[in-house]
Amino acid sequence: MDKFTFTIEAEEGKARVGQITTPHGKIDTPVFMPVGTLGSVKTVSPAELAELKVQIILANNYHLYLRPGLEIIRQAKGIHNFMSWEKPILTDSGGFQVFSLGKGNKGDHNLVKIKDDGVEFRSHLDGTKHLFTPEGVIKMQETIGADIIMCFDECAPHDSTFEYAQRAMERTHGWAKQALSFHEKQGRLSEYGHYQALFGIIQGVIFDKLRLESAKYISSLPFDGIAIGGLSVGEEKIDMHRTLDLIEPSLPREKPRYLMGVGSPEDLLEGVERGIDMFDCVLATRIARNGTVWTKLGRLNLNNAKYSSDFKPIELECDCSACQQFSRAYISHLIREKEILGIRLTTLHNLRFLMKLMEQVRVAIREKRFKKFKEEFLHNFEK
């Protein structure tokens, strides 16, 4: 497998089931991608991820560039070898992280200096100065060696003015064209010879005019897939839903659609209903580290005293190792005592919960009952 393909296998309304083929394996969509920022999904081994039926993970170019550094990854012959993960990997460009350094005053923070040809910033680790350019970020990701890579973009804050959002969008468009041209000159290949799919990113904050313009422009370029950035960053849910509804008709049907940074169960279902194929988010692992788990009836906070003598599993129907072997009481004890095993178990459960949810979604779409499935799930989950 040396190319990237996407086929649609079933549809219900805008919701669709498909399959992505990459050099490191196939991905059934809709899919949730756990986040392994530094080449590791926190507290979970690659073997355990495979047992959870994780199909693809996400790593971050910004963080990997700073540590361990590109030369270490090159010596390992790519990120797959470095972390012993044989399945597909997607790397984010690091644009969100770079611009987050200047969050609060539209990129004028002393850590970030935005130029038309790139962004100069100081590392959050040691204050050293670095420059990210559209071409440079692609080259970094070619060294990392993921199967799917992202253009460098400017993710403007959700409370930006129209004028600032427009400038950020236009800069994103210019960078997208530069990144695509550079990657094509490289044969769209990693340093290790396998094909790397490149996704363009739609921006525009929550301004309908800008979002529609960005969707049309990014969709007009020969990217392998289309990503939607700058949502789930502080705006109201109604604005995210409206934006997805607005731009969906402008997105190429034959390319996978990736909604960046979205991963709560309810948001996954809302996204699928609006034609989204790929999702990622740190939420599943982040809340797990605070002792919170998802069940079909909503969230449980295992820090609560009432679970200290509750000897049921987190969820009876769950097939994860946490639910198959341990009780709420035991996991609650581990969480309250800050034992590492506790957050490993809650993380395993939350990841399996999302994997199973997406499995159920794919079956429901194939059987033309997704709308009913979504309604029933949310009715129980929101209780």
Image (cartoon, rainbow, N blue to C red):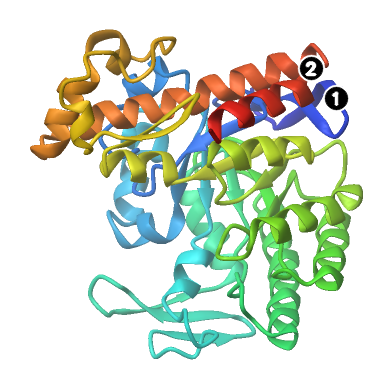
Q: Name the secondary structure under disc 2.
A: loop
The answer, for residue 324, to whether it is visible in the render is yes
Residue beneath the point at 74% across and 43% down = 224
Amino acid of disc 2:
Arg
- Of tags 1 and 2, the one toward the viewer is 2
Q: Residue 43 location, x and y as percent?
A: 25, 35
Which label belongs to residue 12? 1
Q: Earlier in the sequence, mark 1 or mark 2?
A: 1
Q: Quadrant of residue 85?
A: top left
Q: Disc 1 marks which amino acid?
A: Glu
Give the residue displayed 86% in from the left and 72% down from the top: 209
Q: Which residue is mark 2?
A: 369
Q: Are marks 1 and 2 in contact (CB under 8 Å)?
A: yes
In this rendered view, identify the residue nearer to me: 351 or 9.
351
Alpha carbon distance from label 1 to label 2: 8 Å
300 up-or-down from 165: above or below:
above
Q: Describe the element under mark 1 as helix, strand or loop.
A: strand
